[in-house]
Image: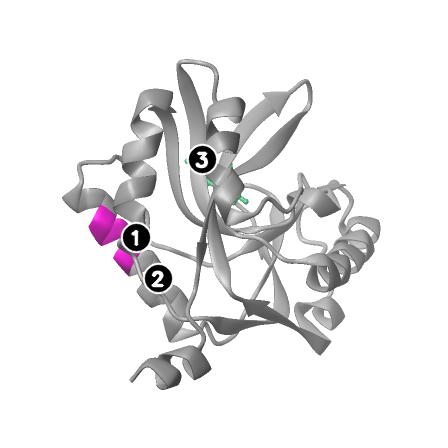
């Protein structure tokens, strides 16, 4: 995924959202090193479980799925979201799980950082307060790595990672999702920084 700078987001949003509506979601996106680590894990899982792995550039963790919305609402959405303040955190990916109902294998964290729940909570509050629709299902942090896997094939050895992947999360993004023939293509159209503890300490 291209790494657009904050200042480019407004212009990018205009360029990237020429249609009447757009399918969007908030997510955190791993940078190069963590993306490579998750990609290597997805390759291993695909070999063992069958199915189709998520392409490296599409590996992410969804915070909130908003779905289809009018492009004319995007500026108001971004403006509202500017009020959300969150703290940076490490997401420690330490295990792999299988969802039978949709035949997905995903990576996750045994201990989900409070900062992540706080961020999602603040986003939901702000969306609700400003009248935006979104998927209200309970937030279950997961990184989808392989889809359409063969049922019941996740070996115990893969369930917990010998070497957890430490993902330092310092921002969240708004992503446009498009369907291209047989796959989803994701493009960032907004970006917000998370404040690190050292900066919080420096301010107060
Ligand atoms: P998934 O990884 O579990 O499929 C873009 O579609 C992202 O939004 C995907 O990461 C997907 O999660 C997530 N998502 C959450 N709710 C969704 C919904 N109702 N429809 C499509 N995608 C959804």
* Relative depth, front residue between 28 and 196: 196
Confirm whether residue 122 shows in the render: yes
- Label 2 vs label 3: CA separation? 22 Å
Q: Are marks 1 and 2 in contact (CB under 8 Å)?
A: yes
Residue 156 placement, left or right of 47 = left
User: In the rendered view, how is the structure colored?
Assistant: one colour
Q: Residues within 10 Å of mark 1 (few under 14, many from 20)?
A: many
| Number of the front mark, 2 or 3 | 3
Residue 198 placement, left or right of 42 = left
Q: Residues within 10 Å of mark 2 (few under 14, many from 20)?
A: some
Q: Which residue is at 75% across, 72% downward?
A: 157
- Label 3 vs label 1: CA separation? 20 Å
Q: Mark 1 — residue?
A: 123
The disc, 2 or 3, on the residue closer to the chain's N-terminal end is 3
Compared with 134, 146 (above or below) is: below
Confirm whether residue 54 shows in the render: no
Q: Which residue is at 80% across, 58% downward?
A: 40
Span colored in magenta? 122-126
Q: Residues within 10 Å of mark 3 (few under 14, many from 20)?
A: some
* Relative depth, front residue between 97 and 77: 77
Determine the main secondary structure of the stretch shown in magenta: helix
Give residue 68's quadrant in the image: top left
Disc on res. 119: 2
Name the secondary structure under disc 3: helix
Compared with 111, 132 (above or below) is: above
Name the secondary structure under disc 2: helix
Q: Are marks 3 and 1 in contact (CB under 8 Å)?
A: no
* Relative depth, front residue between 72 and 148: 72
Q: Which residue is at 35% across, 62% downward?
A: 119
* Relative depth, front residue between 184 and 73: 73
Ligand 1 is within 8 Å of the C-beta of the residue at disc 3: no
Q: Mark 3 — residue?
A: 10
């Amino acid at each position: 995924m291209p790494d657009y700078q904050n200042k480019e987001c407004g212009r990018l949003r205009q360029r990237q959202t020429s249609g009447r509506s757009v399918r969007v979601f908030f997510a955190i996106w791993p940078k190069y090193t963590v993306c490579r680590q998750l990609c290597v894990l997805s390759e291993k899982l695909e070999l063992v479980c069958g199915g189709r792995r998520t392409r490296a550039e599409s590996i992410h963790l969804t915070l909130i799925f908003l779905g289809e919305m009018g492009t004319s609402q995007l500026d108001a959405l971004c403006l509202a979201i500017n009020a959300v303040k969150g703290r940076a955190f490490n997401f420690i990916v330490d295990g792999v799980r299988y969802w039978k109902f949709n035949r997905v294998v995903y990576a996750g964290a045994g201990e989900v950082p409070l900062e992540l729940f706080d961020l999602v909570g603040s986003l939901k509050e702000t969306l609700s307060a400003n009248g935006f629709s979104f998927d209200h299902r309970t937030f279950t942090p997961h990184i989808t790595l392989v889809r359409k896997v063969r049922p019941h094939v996740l070996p115990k050895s893969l369930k917990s990672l010998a070497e957890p992947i430490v993902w330092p999360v310092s921002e969240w993004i708004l992503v446009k999702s498009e369907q291209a023939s047989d796959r989803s293509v994701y493009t960032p159209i907004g970006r917000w920084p998370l404040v690190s503890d050292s900066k919080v300490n420096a301010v107060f």
